[in-house]
Image: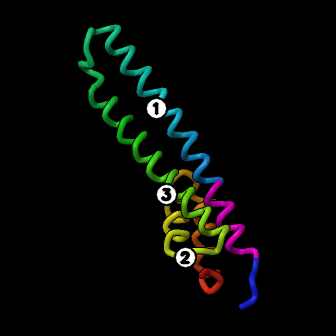
Amino acid sequence: MEKTPMPIVAGSFTIASAGLSLIIFIGLLISSIILAWIAVDITGWLTGMGIALNVLVVLTVLSLFFGILALVGGIYAVQRKRWGWALTGSICALVPTFVLGLAAVILTVLSRDEFE
């Protein structure tokens, strides 16, 4: 089959979305630390901030998880290897940037025959 640039474009979109997800992870991590520090400074404990801090921690972990999966999938898409991982990465790219992720999913699905 003739090779098209679709997997490379899909991988690039996925990697860009992964980068954004990892930047969001860093922001959420810093926010969690600052919120915990302020709560402990004001109250001496995390009372009253427990729910907000738990939500921030969950979002932080999820952004790291989706970012890593999207990064791995994007790398496989650019290499035209492991279509399943490339598709998983592009689906994970839907979380931080829906438009880039949707384009990555569509291009990955359309270029399935080009993967090893």
In this rendering, position of residue 41 left or right of residue 78: left
Q: Can you tell which quarter of the image residue 71 is in?
A: bottom right
In this rendering, would 40 be left or right of 106? left
Q: Secondary structure at mark 1?
A: helix
What residue is at 27 percent from the left and 9 percent from the top?
Answer: 44
Is 58 magenta? The answer is no
Circles 1 and 2 in contact, beta carbons < 8 Å: no
Q: Quick one: label 2, few (<14), some, or many (20+) residues within 10 Å? A: many
Earlier in the chain: of badge 1 and badge 3, it is 1
Q: Earlier in the sequence, mark 1 or mark 2?
A: 1
Residues under labels 2 and 3: Cα distance?
Answer: 13 Å
Closer to the chain start, of discs 2 and 3, is 3
Quadrant containing the N terminus in the rendered view: bottom right
**Which SS class for mark 2?**
helix
Q: Position of residue 80 (x, y in %)?
A: 64, 74
Identify the residue under disc 2. Answer: 83
Magenta residues span 5-15
In the rendering, which numbered label is found on residue 29? 1
Quadrant where the image shows the C terminus: bottom right
Q: Using a 10 Å C-alpha cutoff, classify the residue at mark 3 as few (fewer than 14 neighbours), some (14 to 19) or many (20 or more).
A: many
* Foreground pick, 76 / 100: 76
Q: Residues within 10 Å of mark 1 (few under 14, many from 20)?
A: some
Above or below: residue 37 compared with residue 91? above
Q: Residue furthest bottom?
A: 1
Q: Give coordinates of residue 101: x percent, y percent.
A: 58, 62
Q: Report the mark closest to the observer, 1 or 3.
A: 3
